[in-house]
């Protein structure tokens, strides 16, 4: 049987896909409509869109496990993800692993997806990671690369970053051994929490130039993001993430990752070294 990987080009999905292939699993990944699957890939690829139920059969037929990721652009999960979950439940599915987030609650779309998975009765595992280290090299990449700064309303709050390679390792464990992991929810974090001032100091040391952390008010930050043309749903999530950090709720750490994998999570300095090319100014 085959494992379907949605969001295979995302910061977590790309590592889920790679680790499954390296483990010898049969994998099918999805690409958005309008994109042509690369014929050179060593795995199946299908055109898929949560908003188009006509694409579900090609994605799900012959599949017994699914890595489910909510696309950041989709906030109405009842309309776009619930039908997909129902379609998966109608098949002989052994496991769905959903990428949620730490501290998920009713105001977040992830919470509704978790409820829909529970109501569907399809075997599933919830992976609730802390803040992705890779967000520093994606969402905040240009501000660091161009302006030598991290500008956020997180105040002096601390965050327990987790590398998406570690997130993928837990997801792959749950996908490969459904009987051991179905029905569980795993909150996974880094070994310690860091302030953004400390993050800026690490970036400075790694890049050989001064990177500073600037704190900003929430209203000003919202206005700046909207001025960049970013979707309102994305802006809302960014404000929520930073509010959680500012209140000290993102600083929680636990030993779940070690318990599941038998090793320590990748440290933040190790991740920053791995990602250093994202912030370099030279080609």
Image: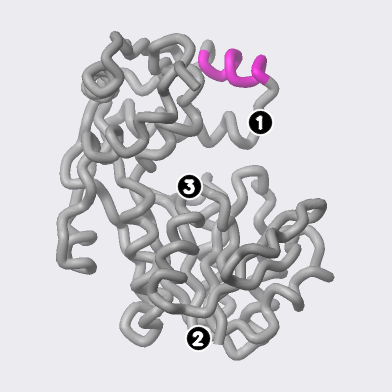
User: Helix, strand or loop at disc 2?
Assistant: loop
- Answer whether residue 227 is magenta in the image: yes
Which corner quadrant of the image does residue 213 belong to? top left
| Discs 2/3, front | 3
Closest to the camera, between mark 2 and mark 1, is 2
Q: Check disc 3: other Cα within 10 Å, few if <14, some if 14-19, many if 20+.
A: many
Report the magenta residues as a range: 221-228
Percent from the top left, x then y, of residue 32? Answer: 73, 54
112 left or right, relative to 275: right
Would you say residue 249 is visible in this rendering? no
Q: x, y percentage for residue 49?
A: 75, 59
Q: Measuring 43% from the left and 78% from the top, which residue is drawn there?
A: 24
Q: Residue at x 57, y 32 (%)?
A: 236
Depth check: 60 or 195 in front? 60
Q: On the image, numbered disc 3 is attached to which residue?
A: 11
Q: Is residue 17 left or right of residue 45?
A: left
Q: Picture coordinates of residue 123 (x, y %)? A: 48, 81
Q: Alpha carbon of mark 3 to alpha carbon of mark 1: how far?
A: 21 Å
């Amino acid at each position: 049987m085959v494992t379907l990987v949605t969001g295979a080009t995302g910061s977590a999905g790309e590592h889920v896909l790679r680790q499954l292939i390296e483990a010898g699993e049969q994998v099918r990944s999805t690409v958005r409509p309008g994109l042509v699957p690369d014929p050179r890939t060593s795995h199946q690829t299908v055109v898929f869109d949560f908003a188009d139920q006509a694409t579900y059969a090609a994605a799900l037929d012959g599949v017994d496990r699914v890595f489910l990721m909510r696309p950041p652009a989709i906030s109405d999960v009842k309309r776009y993800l619930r039908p997909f979950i129902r379609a998966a439940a109608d098949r002989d599915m052994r496991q769905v692993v959903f990428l949620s987030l730490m501290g998920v609650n009713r105001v977040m779309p992830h919470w509704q997806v978790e409820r829909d998975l529970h109501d569907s009765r399809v075997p599933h595992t919830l992976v609730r990671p802390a803040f992705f280290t890779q967000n520093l090299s994606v969402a905040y990449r240009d501000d660091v690369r161009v302006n030598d700064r991290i500008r956020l309303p997180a105040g002096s709050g601390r965050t327990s970053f987790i590398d998406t390679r570690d997130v993928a390792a837990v997801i792959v464990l749950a996908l490969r051994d459904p009987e051991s992991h179905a029905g569980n929810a795993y909150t996974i974090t880094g070994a310690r929490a860091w302030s953004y001032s400390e993050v800026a100091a690490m970036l400075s040391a790694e890049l050989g130039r001064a990177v500073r952390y600037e704190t900003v008010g929430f209203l000003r930050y919202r206005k700046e993001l909207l001025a960049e043309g970013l979707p309102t749903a994305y802006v809302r999530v960014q404000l929520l993430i930073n509010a959680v950090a500012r209140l000290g709720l993102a600083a929680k750490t636990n030993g779940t990752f070690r318990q599941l994998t038998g090793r320590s999570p990748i440290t933040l300095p190790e991740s920053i070294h791995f990602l250093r090319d994202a912030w370099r100014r030279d080609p």
